[in-house]
Amino acid sequence: MRVSFIVNGAEQTVDEVWEGESLLYVLRERMGLPGSKNACEQGECGSCTVYLDGTPVCACLVAAGQADGREVRTVEGLADGDRLDPIQEAFVEAGAVQCGFCTPGLLVQAHDLIERRPEPSDAEIREALAGNLCRCTGYEKILEAVRLAAARRAAAP
Amino acid sequence: MDFLRPTTWDEALAAMAEHPDAVPIQGGTDVMVELNFDMRRPAVLLDLGRITELTGSETADGRLRIGAGVSYTRVIEDLGDRLPGLAQAARTVGSPQIRNRGSVGGNLGAASPAGDSHPPLLAGDAVIEVESVRGIRMIPATDFYVGVKRNRLEPGELIRAFWMAPATGPQYFSKIGTRNAMVIAVCSFAVALHPEERRVGTGIGSAAPTPRRASAAEEFLRRELDWDGPLDEAVAREFGELVRKAAAPIDDVRGTAGYRRHALAVMARRTLAWAWNDYRAGKPGRGVA
Ligand SMILES: Cc1cc2nc3c(=O)[nH]c(=O)nc-3n(C[C@H](O)[C@H](O)[C@H](O)COP(=O)(O)OP(=O)(O)OC[C@H]3O[C@@H](n4cnc5c(N)ncnc54)[C@H](O)[C@@H]3O)c2cc1C
Ligand code: FES
Ligand code: FES
């Protein structure tokens, strides 16, 4: 089947998509957008988190055909050209990335949190990131990165 | 495999009539796991995600009619004040990403005994509206679950909505699991006070082949509760015992039957006490999950 949708601002059409396939598979395997990671394919790890019509979802749990006509934003769409998004900068600076496998999903989820709650409490950060697993960092640096990004945003004019 | 994308409810019903074996997909948080792991290969997938009727809710005859496709996130944000028990349960579902996609209709469709919507739907006297080209049926939640992951739906039928009266008294949901997110309930319990009828509703999750009410416990409270006084501790304890007896749990990887029975008695006693305190204090009772 054919799926047409907007990905990171550009109209895209993909043909010969199998009907039972996930949005994650289409992004990674058919469109060459490997940013969103595939770790569990069952919604448990959050590494495939993307925006679907502005809402963060697990791309592995969206049927490709459900994305037809909709708007998807992946981790590849966070930066503005060469300029990293502030949340990405904060992850780099805080040392919130080790192997990096969980990072794309965490970035999208944290990006959404700061959009919705510009000054999140620690409890709110933990709650927002509860569906994103990281095997490396122990999460402390990730929390720090989110706090940093939120503080900078609050301080910005 | 066919992928059907109806854009209206009538189109969806017509598609179900033509392909009674089609698998509906709303949020996909159950269906996609089965597809990804090759546990299911339906001939037809029927996407309900474009049917706007399913994601709306309205008030009719003083009751709320909530579309089957309304996500947990919307339940929490838009309905939490009127359906506090269901909203508390919704807050415990999966993770934010899962709550953004997963729906109460999908929970009803899957009909897992561990589904978190079910106890508050039972305690709050929800009625499930199902429809096919043959017509509409209104099924009380109490009659909706028929076995492990089996519900009353007949071939060609879809869940349109569930109906519930806005809370008239405090409601609580309690769930046992190993962490605060991403847990399938070891067992769960919901309580809803209906002060105008001097009645208490209950719902037990993950402790029997289906979600169920604790009817004897409800009857006991109808006889014994003094609605004008503080909660008698002996009454609360007996309520817990009757809830324990209403369960028929099994041993599994998440917990033993004995643990589930014990935990249910404790949760029943506690949630009743929380609700009672709110009721006495004149609070609507949203509390914590
Ligand atoms: C990581 C993860 C964590 C989870 N955690 C929880 C949890 O904590 N608590 C919990 O209760 N559940 C949990 N679930 C299960 C799931 O999210 C819920 O059951 C959810 O309510 C399903 O809704 P959905 O819209 O995604 O359903 P879908 O996957 O789209 O559908 C589920 C079932 O219902 C049927 N269906 C859907 N809509 C209709 C309709 N309108 N009419 C008839 N049939 C219909 C489908 O055919 C399918 O059989 C979790 C799932 C995942 C992947
Ligand atoms: S790959 Fe989607 S949540 Fe793990
Ligand atoms: S950095 Fe390795 S999983 Fe998070």
Image: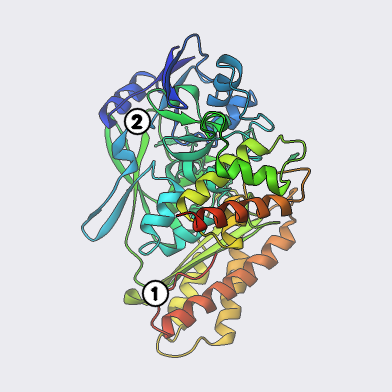
Instruction: Please name whichever residue, B101 or A12, is drawn nearer the observer in this view of the structure.
Output: A12
What residue occupies the far top of the structure in this picture? A16
Residue A76 vs A137, above or below: the answer is above
Quadrant in the picture for the C terminus of chain B: bottom right
Tag 1: amino acid: Pro
Instruction: Give coordinates of residue B204: x percent, y percent.
Output: 55, 59
Q: Does the residue labelled 2 lie within 8 Å of ligand 1?
A: no
Kindly state the secondary structure of the residue where label 1 is placed. loop
B91 relative position to A100: left or right:
left
Kindly state the secondary structure of the residue where label 2 is placed. loop
Instruction: Give coordinates of residue B233: x percent, y percent.
Output: 58, 86
B47 relative position to B61: left or right:
right
Quadrant in which ligand 2 is drawn: top right
Residue on which disc 1 sits: B284
> In the rendered image, which quarter is residue B47 located in?
top left
**Residue at image x 52%, y 38%?**
A57
Tag 2: amino acid: Arg
Q: How busy is the neighbourhood of tag 2: few (under 14 within 10 Å), some, or many (20 plus)?
A: some
Which of the numbered marks, if any, corresponds to residue B50? 2
> Mark 1 falls within which chain?
B
Instruction: Please name whichever residue, B65 or A59, is drawn nearer the observer in this view of the structure.
Output: A59
